[in-house]
Amino acid sequence: MMDNRCNLRFALVILLIHEVSLQSITIEAVQGDSVILLCSARGYEKDVFWRHNNTKTVYDIIEGKEDFHDQDAVFRGRVKGFPSKFTEGNYSIRLSDVIYSDAGNYSCKIPNSKTVHVELRIKGSGRNSGITTSTDWVAVFQLVCVLLFGFTL
């Protein structure tokens, strides 16, 4: 019985990751928060490019390694990737100490594959950040990220 539950949970996790990766995601944060900008692929990709409003370089992965050479100054020291998860197709990033100018559209471009779009909205006050999409099970996905990948949303 326990093995069946574990298998069912694993299948649900894979389905959630696949489904969310196909959508545009909106994240809300309060100034000073840290947020996870989600991006995943079906497998390992050696080049991935994160951009803010199609102009600013947020984070690059080149030949499977983090590359901060062209990173926009506003993001220096505030963006962290998860290199140990690259081989699993996870290219999400953590943006720390969110400021109002961070609001906008982020794209995670995976050449010859897809582009994931994430909108970041900055709320006025309070500590209630969250992710919203068109699905009802986003809270489950957040929990999965924490339990399986160690992300704190």
Image (cartoon, rainbow, N blue to C red):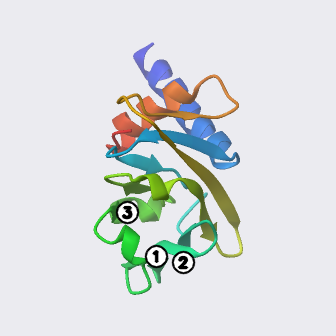
Crowding at mark 3 (Cα within 10 Å: few <14, some 14-19, many 20+):
some
- Can you see residue 65? no
Q: Is residue 93 left or right of residue 45?
A: left
Can residue 108 be seen in this snapshot? Answer: yes
Taking depth in this image into account, of 72 and 90 the one nearest to the observer is: 72
Identify the residue at image location x=63%, y=42%. 20
Quarter-wise, where is residue 107 in the image? bottom right
Question: What's the distance in space between the residues labelled 2 and 3, CA to CA?
Answer: 13 Å
- The numbered disc on residue 27 is none
Residue furthest toward the front?
124
- Above or below residue 112? Residue 115 is above
Check residue 61 in the rendering and tell me which mark sits there, or answer none: 1
Three-letter amino acid code of the residue under disc 1: Ile
Query: Which residue type carries mark 2?
Result: Asp
User: Residue 70, image x and y in percent?
Assistant: 44, 85
Q: Which residue is mark 2?
A: 47
* Neighbour tally class for label 2: few under 14, some 14-19, many 20 plus, Cα within 10 Å: some
How far across and how far down the image is residue 53, in percent?
62, 66
Depth check: give the residue in front, 45 or 82: 82
Q: Are marks 1 and 3 in contact (CB under 8 Å)?
A: yes
- In this orientation, which residue lies closer to the viewer: 87 or 119? 119
Residue placed furthest toward the left: 77
* Quadrant of the snapshot with the C terminus: top left
Where disc 2 sits, the SS reads: loop
Query: What residue does disc 3 label?
Result: 81
Which of pointers 2 and 3 indicates the residue nearer the eye? 3
- Kind of residue at badge 3: Gly
User: On the image, which quarter does residue 18 sit in?
Assistant: top right
Q: Is residue 26 left or right of residue 79?
A: right
